[in-house]
Amino acid sequence: PERPRLATPARWGGAGSRGGACCSNLNINDVLGNYSLTLVDALDTLAIMGNSSEFQKAVKLVINTVSFDKDSTIQVFEATIRVLGSLLSAHRIITDSKQPFGDMAIKDYDNELLHMAHDLAVRLLPAFENTKTGIPYPRVNLKTGVPPDSNNETCTAGAGSLLVEFGILSRLLGDSTFEWVARRAVKALWNLRSNDTGLLGNVVNIQTGDWVGKQSGLGAGLDSFYEYLLKSYILFGEKEDLEMFNAAYQSIQNYLRRGREACNEGEGDPPLYVNVNMFSGQLMNTWIDSLQAFFPGLQVLIGDVEDAICLHAFYYAIWKRYGALPERYNWQLQAPDVLFYPLRPELVESTYLLYQATKNPFYLHVGMDILQSLEKYTKVKCGYATLHHVIDKSKEDRMESFFLSETCKYLYLLFDEENPVHKSGSKYMFTTEGHIVSVDKHLRESPWKEFFSEDRGQDQEGKFVHRPKPQELKVLNSSSNCNRVPDERRYSLPLKSIYMRQIDQMVGLI
């Protein structure tokens, strides 16, 4: 969706989709922040695996040792999806009265993770001030705010994929500020889309609203923007989010999709989603990046399962060839353009979701193939290493935090049929960083809709005003059920019937 990672040129504007760095070296990402990133990012993975002792130990370690009062300049997007999202997910697991994953409660827990999430989010707020469009700066210093020499260019996904985490925090605290700034950024980006195609570019100037990067695609720079339009609707029930997603998905189908109309029949090439100019819809290049492999999973969520199967097969074929996904692959030359693989989860994520939708054992074989490749090519004495080169299998001394928060989690869930995620009766959704969120009616409660209008919330100097008074801190328990409106245009009847039996139970229950 994605979630979230290393730099590609599409992310040079700053906080790129599923990660990003503003540098000439595509393989560097300044996300660490000096706040025990991997420890924090992996909290709910321990819970999903049912390891209560290690989960409790890790939570206490975070509470006792992690602080955001640091002179660190960090990426707003990465800090939000990796750290804020994990703190909120772990907090809700601890305070869930049903405790579906086993005894994950912490003795004498006093909402410390929620307070930490609040502290971090407050330190991110300066990124949203003094920006003429409402689109945030890509980076902020945790102590001093926006650095004086800050870049005015940011990626669409980095600026527009904050609403899930910020919205959850706002609704848990009863303070609209965080959801308001994130939603304002989404609307600002949406209003800058092309009048002709409905597409957005991948890099924008936050002061002028001019598109610096005019490439529109499904990968780096844009991916989680689309993902969070749908997931924000699922979580919060705001119809405008669904309306934006449906319009965006239609534009994607109209201008990015190439190949035959039907996946498994007819003449022509199998479907492929390409990179185009946002204004003309004309092809810009002949490569796709590995982040795009999240898209079949998103298509599963809306019921477009047949297309998801085809696109997933394309990425799996690349994996079969190299034992990994190169960061960028030239589909015309049928060869990698950028050769590293940083243990990304997107293909595993889509494999897991397609198995849940179809229960076809083929996807268990795909998962085993991926697992065996990881064991063979990336395992080292102290963990798993980024592949520097997918052909010669040389390694880098680096294991990104999303390997534990996503790649391992989705692989584990793929094979664990009896996991509480599948059996508890509660309905769950994953953030773009793979953090689990229970979907329940408490997150649908929004007493501040009037504060989401375009003309409220900032004065002429860009300072926030007219905030509702924060309510007393509440601990909300996870409940069940979620909502979605599927696209029913193009999936085969057997797959539709298999999938819709599951998804229809989640419709209209809130």
Image (cartoon, helix red, strand yellow):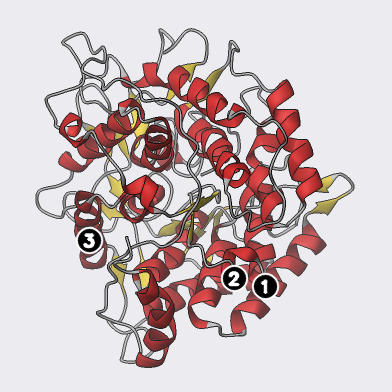
The answer to whether the residues at label 1 and label 2 have Cβ atoms under 8 Å apart is yes
Q: CA distance from mark 3 to mark 1?
A: 33 Å
Taking the image as drawn, is residue 225 in sight? no
Q: Amino acid at mark 3?
A: Asn
Residue 386: percent from the left, percent from the top? 71, 47
Q: Is residue 220 found left or right of 461 in the rendered image?
A: right
Q: Which residue is mark 2?
A: 423
Q: CA distance from mark 1 to mark 2?
A: 6 Å
Q: Judging from the image, what secondary structure is the residue with disc 3 in?
A: helix
Q: Is residue 128 above or below residue 501?
A: above
Which residue is drawn at the image coordinates 58% and 66% (left, top)?
424
Taking the image as drawn, is residue 218 in sight? yes
Q: Is residue 197 found left or right of 1 in the rendered image?
A: left
Residue 486: percent from the left, percent from the top? 29, 71
Residue 62: percent from the left, percent from the top? 70, 29
Tell me the quarter of the picture where residue 70 sits. Answer: top right
- Mark 1 or mark 2: whose residue is earlier in sequence: 1
- Mark 2 or mark 3: whose residue is earlier in sequence: 3
Q: Which residue is mark 3?
A: 246
Q: Judging from the image, what secondary structure is the residue with disc 1 in?
A: loop
Q: Amino acid at mark 1?
A: Glu
Q: Quadrant of the C terminus?
A: bottom left
Q: Is residue 121 found left or right of 54 in the rendered image?
A: left
Nearest-to-viewer mark from 3 and 1: 1
Q: Which residue is mark 1?
A: 418
Q: CA distance from mark 2 to mark 3?
A: 30 Å
Q: Is residue 242 above or below residue 368?
A: above
Residue 73: percent from the left, percent from the top? 53, 17
* Total count of labels: 3
The answer to whether the residues at label 3 and label 1 have Cβ atoms under 8 Å apart is no
- Mark 3 or mark 1: whose residue is earlier in sequence: 3
